[in-house]
Amino acid sequence: MNFDLTDDQEALRDGIRSLCTGRFDMARNRAGFDRSVWDELAETGVFSLIADGFGWADAAIAFEELGRALVPGPLVWGVLTHGLLDDLDGGVVGGVERPIPDTPDQPAGPVMLEHLDALDALVALDPGGVARIDLAELVAGEPLDWPLDPLTPVHRVAVLPAGELIADAGTARQWQLAGAVLTAAYQVGMAHACVERATGYSLERYQFDRPVGSFQAIKHMLADALVRAEVARTAVHAAAVTLDDPEVGHVARAVAGAKLLAGEAALKNARTAVQVHGGMGFTWEVDMHLYLKRAWVLDTVFGTPDETAGTVAATVGPKS
């Protein structure tokens, strides 16, 4: 399989990277998500990529750049729901994976809704389909004072209404796979950003009249981080290609493997970057803690590490 980007894909990558560099620097991202972020991404065509004829492989390239810049917001849901809600022209759409109770007679537990105050619509995904939740029916959620990701405000809602079914189980399965691919692509972008930022700092920070990046221990840490990011990137591109053309391979296995590797790369590379920054890496002023906290959050959506590892294990071997 050839993973070289086409000319069009390179143009897409460079265009999204230019957008992020020019409009979504860390100072703006630290201000959090608002409608202007959504509007600018929508105007650029990020959310309409699939509707405009691009494939999931192309969308993954775009999300890799969004992750590199740590752009906030319910971005994956913007792609998944594009064109589904006819009455919502340009509105902000968020989503949540509905918790499944352990037993049928047990009520589903509380849910954490991101960016609730900014949403115009909310959808819930579960194996039975996709439902639109009337925001007016939500019992007033309790905002978390200290969400894990400080750039992602979270409300804790005790009960999620059933909502109106707007898509069937087939669509839900497709969304689960596509959402995992886009999330993994975002994580890969984060993993690469951590390598780049840590490497840059290691060449600027001097100890004993030498840049710390010249020390063998730091070199090994950064080399391992780069390998993790590249392996995860290849896995994500392979999963996206498989999602576009299921005859290429086993879709569920490819997607689960990509999500597993991307989550590991984002988390370990963020930790490495914090360590390379030394005592400064733990401070609010240095951006590395934001990458680490976002990595923790994304590692639990569209498949936890245990779930994705279980899928891979269940789909390998002669019977898969």
Image: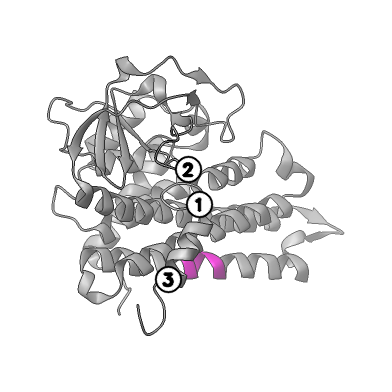
The mark that comes first in sequence, 3 or 2, is 2
Q: Position of residue 12 (x, y in %)?
A: 27, 54
Give amino acid for label 3: Ala
Q: Is residue 224 above or below residue 93?
A: below
Q: Is residue 149 left or right of residue 317?
A: right
The mark that comes first in sequence, 1 or 3, is 1
Report the residue marked by disc 2: 70
Q: Furthest residue to the right?
A: 208
Render colour scheme: one colour
Is residue 231 shown in magenta? Answer: yes
Q: Nearer the viewer, mark 3 or mark 2?
A: 3
Q: Is residue 283 left or right of residue 77?
A: right
Quadrant in the picture for residue 6: bottom left
Q: Is residue 254 above or below residue 284?
A: below
Q: Mark 1: give few (<14), some (14-19) or many (20+) Cα within 10 Å.
A: many
Give amino acid for label 1: Met
Give amino acid for label 2: Leu
| Region of the chain picked out in magenta, as a range | 227-234
- Report if the CB atoms under discs 1 and 3 are less than 8 Å apart: no
Q: Nearer the viewer, residue 149 or 289?
A: 149
Q: Mark 3: give few (<14), some (14-19) or many (20+) Cα within 10 Å.
A: few
Q: CA distance from mark 2 to mark 1?
A: 7 Å
Q: Nearer the viewer, residue 87 or 61?
A: 87
Report the residue marked by disc 3: 314
- Report if the CB atoms under discs 2 and 1 are less than 8 Å apart: yes
Report the residue marked by disc 1: 190
Q: Position of residue 28 (x, y in %)?
A: 47, 30
Q: CA distance from mark 3 to mark 2?
A: 33 Å
